[in-house]
Image (spheres, rainbow, N blue to C red):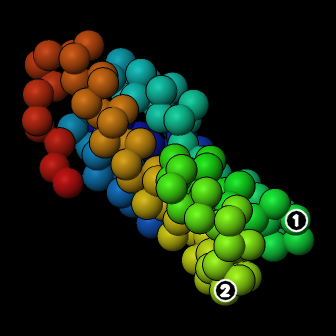
Amino acid sequence: MANVLRHLPELEGMELGYIQGLMKSMDEDQASLFAQVYRARRKDAQMILILTLIGFFGFAGLHRFILGQIGLGILYILTVGLCFIGTIVDLVNYKSLAYEYNVKMAHETLAMISNHFPNMGSTTTI
């Protein structure tokens, strides 16, 4: 059982619990590879907050582009953050936006490293 805090000490809250559940059946090599790839792909909630604030005072929708939501990013640009209402909602929900993106990246990372470690298979639960 891999210690998630040793591999990913920057995690906190719901993300920490979720990643801990994914890593519970990994050995140290698998956990180290997972942590290395996941760290490079995840987005920090504070960065999403800063980008959303930039959108509120300037370029609306930048945070949606960073989260891979290109369509919403274009919509925010064309509608000035849905007349600021969408940007205000995103300011309130920036942590959940980052969490949802990071969960998606965790699953993609898990699928990627399962190719590297075939014995891992689908032993992790969601």
According to the picture, the residue beneath numbered tag 1 turns out to be 58
Q: How many marks?
A: 2
Q: Dividing the picture into quarters, in which one does residue 52 lie?
A: bottom right
To which residue does mark 2 refer? 85
Kindly indicate the quadrant of the structure image that contains residue 88. Answer: bottom right
Query: What residue sits 38% from the left and 42% below the top?
Result: 106
Residue found at x 11% / y 35%: 122
Image quadrant assignment for residue 110: top left
Q: Nearer the viewer, residue 56 or 28?
A: 56
Q: In the displayed structure, does residue 114 sit left or right of residue 61?
A: left
Quarter of the rendering occupied by the N terminus: top left
**Label 1, residues with CA under 10 Å away: few <14, some 14-19, many ≥20:** few
Give the position of the C terminus as an image quadrant: bottom left
Dot 1 or dot 2, earlier in sequence: 1
Helix, strand or loop at mark 1: loop
Question: x, y (%) of residue 57?
Answer: 88, 71
User: In screen coordinates, is 39 left or right of 58?
Assistant: left
Q: Viewed as shown, does residue 52 lie left or right of 109?
A: right
CA gap between label 1 and label 2 equals 14 Å
Point out residue 11 in the picture as x, y percentages from the top left corner.
56, 52
Residue lying farthest to the front in this orientation: 78
Instruction: Tell me which amino acid carries mark 1.
Output: Gly
Amino acid type shown at disc 2: Ile
For image coordinates 22% across by 23% down, the residue present is: 114
Residue occupying image coordinates x 16% and y 49%: 125
Q: The residue tagged with tag 2: helix, strand or loop?
A: helix
Report if residue 50 is visible in the image: no
Mark 2 is surrounded, within 10 Å at the Cα level, by few (under 14), some (14 to 19) or many (20 or more) other residues, namely few
